[in-house]
Image (cartoon, rainbow, N blue to C red):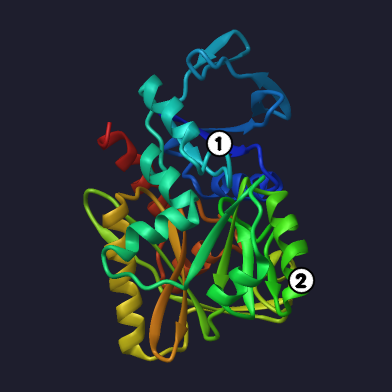
């Protein structure tokens, strides 16, 4: 009998539409000869499985749903939610209590990687370089001149949690700082102001199972905009994503080894993608994407194709590994 896989998408953040696209991608990548696949949309109003274009409400007691009189409890959840509750550990904790295997990193790892500043502090202890930054919290007043004195100009202002470049601004002048902070606070209760590093943007995708460790070819990102913002990420022609990245072999190896080290230090699971800036031949860690985009045009599928791997086989490996971990 085939295992039942719930591909969960949506979520509670501005990234829910991007997550829907990733969910569609994952559904197309999973081998239907080995698994029965059920898309599941999660939002603040309701959780529901989608089958034959009809919605079937999820029971939160056991994550089950009923189709044509048959109760279905997924054997595994493939988590494609970007943002809360799929990337911050909430969904992982819920599934852990129900003893339902899932493909993404567990609760603590998800929560840690979702918080950009906390993740940097953790990795800095193990020698991983990152840009200088400060965290701001709502309802606390700050002296903007002191922030600029500490971080310098230009700088980036971004939500401390979240992704897909929502709420991010590049600040050139001090007058731009306050509106940039207000914009970021619309996406998160904490805002990170980060030193600007001028260099090459490189991203590394990888996954590990009990059987193997696979680091995918690196991708260089060149944005037509001021930086790799939402428009550059999701508008055709606004950025170049070059895989394999045309960089020095020694630097490429250092990024690959650092990425593998970070994966193990954080105890990640399934696919992750790690972003870096390379400046003066020094690599600087930016962030971990614990649930990276999975549309056919997303970076991870591009890297899989560049390595000449079969994407269906990889998804089978990751799903089957989730059972072995329970």
Residue 180 point in image, percent of width and height: 73, 63
Nearest to the eye among marks 2 and 1: give it: 2
Q: In which quadrant of the rendered image does the C terminus lie?
A: top left
**Which residue is drawn at the image coordinates 63% and 37% (left, top)?**
11
Q: Relative to residue 284, is residue 47 depicted above or below?
A: above
Q: Is residue 225 left or right of residue 42?
A: right
Q: Position of residue 45 (x, y in %)?
A: 72, 24
Q: Residue at x 28, y 63 (%)?
A: 125
Residue wearing tag 1: 85
The N terminus appears in which quarter of the rendering?
A: top left
Label 2 belongs to which residue? 176
Q: Is residue 287 visible?
A: yes
Alpha carbon separation for disc pair 2 and 1: 31 Å
Identify the mark nearer the N-term, 2 or 1: 1
Residues 68 and 33: in front is 68
**Is residue 75 something one can see in this rendering?**
no
Q: Is residue 42 above or below residue 119?
A: above
Q: Are marks 2 and 1 in contact (CB under 8 Å)?
A: no
| Pick the front one: 134 or 294 | 134
- Left or right: 237 as drawn, with respect to 290: right
Quarter of image, res 173: bottom right
Q: Is residue 316 above or below residue 43?
A: below
Residue at position x 60%, y 19% in the image: 58
- Residue that extends furthest to the top in the rendered view of this protein: 69
Q: Regarding mark 2 in the picture, which secondary structure is present there?
A: helix
Q: Nearer the viewer, residue 31 or 268?
A: 268
Q: Position of residue 285 (x, y in %)?
A: 42, 70
Alpha-carbon neighbours of circle 2 within 10 Å: few (<14), some, or many (≥20)?
Answer: few
Q: Position of residue 287 (x, y in %)?
A: 47, 62
């Amino acid at each position: 009998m085939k295992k039942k896989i719930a591909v969960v998408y949506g979520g509670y953040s501005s990234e829910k539409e991007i997550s829907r696209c990733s969910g569609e991608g994952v559904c197309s990548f999973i081998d239907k000869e080995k698994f029965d696949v059920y898309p599941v949309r999660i939002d603040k109003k309701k959780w529901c499985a989608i089958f034959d274009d009809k919605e079937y409400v999820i029971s939160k007691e056991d994550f089950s749903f009923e189709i044509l009189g048959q109760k279905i409890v997924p054997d595994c959840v493939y988590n494609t939610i970007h943002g809360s509750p799929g990337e911050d550990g909430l969904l992982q904790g819920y599934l852990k209590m129900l003893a339902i295997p899932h493909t993404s990193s567990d609760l603590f790892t998800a929560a840690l990687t979702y918080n950009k500043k906390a993740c940097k502090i953790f990795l800095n202890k193990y020698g991983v370089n990152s840009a200088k930054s400060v965290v701001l919290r709502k309802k606390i007043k700050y002296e903007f001149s002191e922030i600029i004195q500490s971080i310098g100009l230009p700088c980036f202002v971004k939500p401390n949690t979240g992704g897909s470049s929502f709420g991010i601004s590049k600040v050139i002048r001090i007058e731009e700082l306050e509106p940039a902070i207000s914009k970021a606070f619309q996406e998160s209760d904490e805002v990170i102001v980060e030193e600007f590093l001028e260099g090459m943007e490189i991203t590394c995708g990888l996954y590990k199972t009990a059987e193997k460790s696979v680091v995918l070819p690196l991708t260089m990102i060149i944005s037509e905009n001021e930086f790799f913002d939402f428009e550059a990420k999701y508008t055709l022609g606004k950025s170049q994503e070059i895989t394999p990245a045309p960089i020095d072999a020694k630097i490429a190896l250092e990024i690959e080894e650092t990425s593998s080290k970070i994966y193990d230090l954080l105890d990640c699971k399934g696919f992750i993608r790690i972003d870096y800036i390379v400046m003066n031949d020094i690599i600087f860690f930016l962030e971990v994407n614990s649930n990276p985009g999975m549309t056919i045009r997303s970076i991870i599928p591009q890297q899989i194709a560049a390595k000449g791997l079969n994407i269906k086989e990889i998804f089978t490996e990751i799903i089957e590994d989730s059972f072995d971990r329970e």
